[in-house]
């Protein structure tokens, strides 16, 4: 019988702990619920107060202030238009830096024509040049093909000059990235 008494006392202890935890859980639940409704009410009051302040400010605006706000809005619109224009503007000078970097030491350019519609469109570079040998010309073409900005290379015409050096016309089309300003190009 002593064993049964110990079991009953353990049951009483565990039910006391369970009751205590249940009470603490209910208190926490009530606190959370009360806090939610309090904060919701406070939020509504502050929103209404903000709306009242905005209405009071709007009522006190003079015609002069309203005209100034319209003027500022107009200038802001113009500035945003210029930002759009500058954002689409390409740095055509990047083509010259590209040519300087990629040109073979034994290749010379005598005529350059660059056609670009915007920084987001494919651009075309037409070159007339000469080299000391066909090997130099081939090395130049391979160097151009290895560049990431080059979309397509077309060798339009090739002939021999009186001196025996090859003369040629190239047409190179570039992906739009070549015209990005230098800061953006260096980050890639």
Image (cartoon, helix red, strand yellow):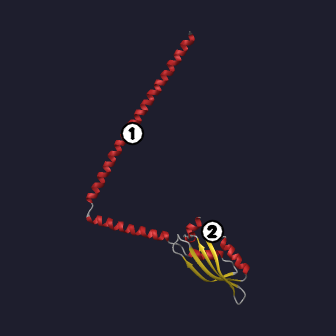
Q: Quadrant of residue 28?
A: top left
Residue bearing the label numbered 2: 148
Q: Position of residue 45 (x, y in %)?
A: 32, 45
Quarter of the C terminus within the rendering: bottom right
Q: Residue at x 33, y 47 (%)?
A: 46
Which label is found at residue 129? Answer: none
Q: Position of residue 52 (x, y in %)?
A: 29, 51
**175 to 56, vertically: above or below:** below
Query: Is residue 76 left or right of 57 when viewed as pictured?
Result: right
Please give the residue where the numbered disc 1 appears in the rendered image. 36
The answer to whether residue 4 is above or below residue 86 is above
Residue farthest to the bottom, as pictured: 162
| Callout 2: SS | loop
Q: Residue at x 66, y 72 (%)?
A: 145
Q: Residue at x 49, y 70 (%)?
A: 88
- Looking at this view, is 151 or 107 the one in front? 151
* Residue 91 pos. (x, y %): 54, 73
- Image quarter in which the N terminus is found: top right
Answer with left or right where residue 117 lies relative to residue 132. left
Left/right placement of residue 77 relative to residue 121 reads: left
Q: Please state the total of marks drawn on the protein image.
A: 2
Give residue 112's position: percent from left, percent from top: 59, 81
Of labels 2 and 1, the one closer to you? 2
* Residue at 58 percent of width and 68 percent of height: 185
């Amino acid at each position: 019988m002593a064993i049964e008494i110990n079991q009953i006392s353990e049951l009483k202890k565990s039910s006391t702990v369970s009751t205590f935890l249940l009470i603490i859980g209910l208190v926490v639940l009530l606190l959370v619920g009360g806090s939610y409704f309090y904060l919701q009410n406070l939020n509504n009051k502050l929103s209404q107060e903000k709306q009242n302040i905005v209405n009071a400010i709007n009522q006190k605006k003079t015609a002069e202030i309203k005209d100034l706000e319209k003027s500022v809005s107009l200038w802001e619109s113009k500035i945003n238009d210029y930002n759009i224009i500058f954002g689409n503007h390409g740095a055509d000078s990047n083509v010259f830096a590209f040519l300087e970097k990629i040109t073979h030491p034994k290749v010379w350019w005598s005529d350059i024509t660059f056609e670009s519609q915007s920084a987001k469109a494919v651009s075309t570079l037409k070159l007339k040049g000469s080299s000391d040998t066909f090997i130099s010309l081939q090395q130049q073409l391979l160097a151009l093909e290895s560049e990431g900005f080059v979309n397509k290379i077309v060798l339009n015409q090739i002939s021999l000059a009186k001196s025996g050096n090859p003369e040629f016309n190239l047409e190179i089309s570039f992906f739009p990235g070549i015209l990005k300003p230098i800061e953006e190009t260096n980050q890639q």
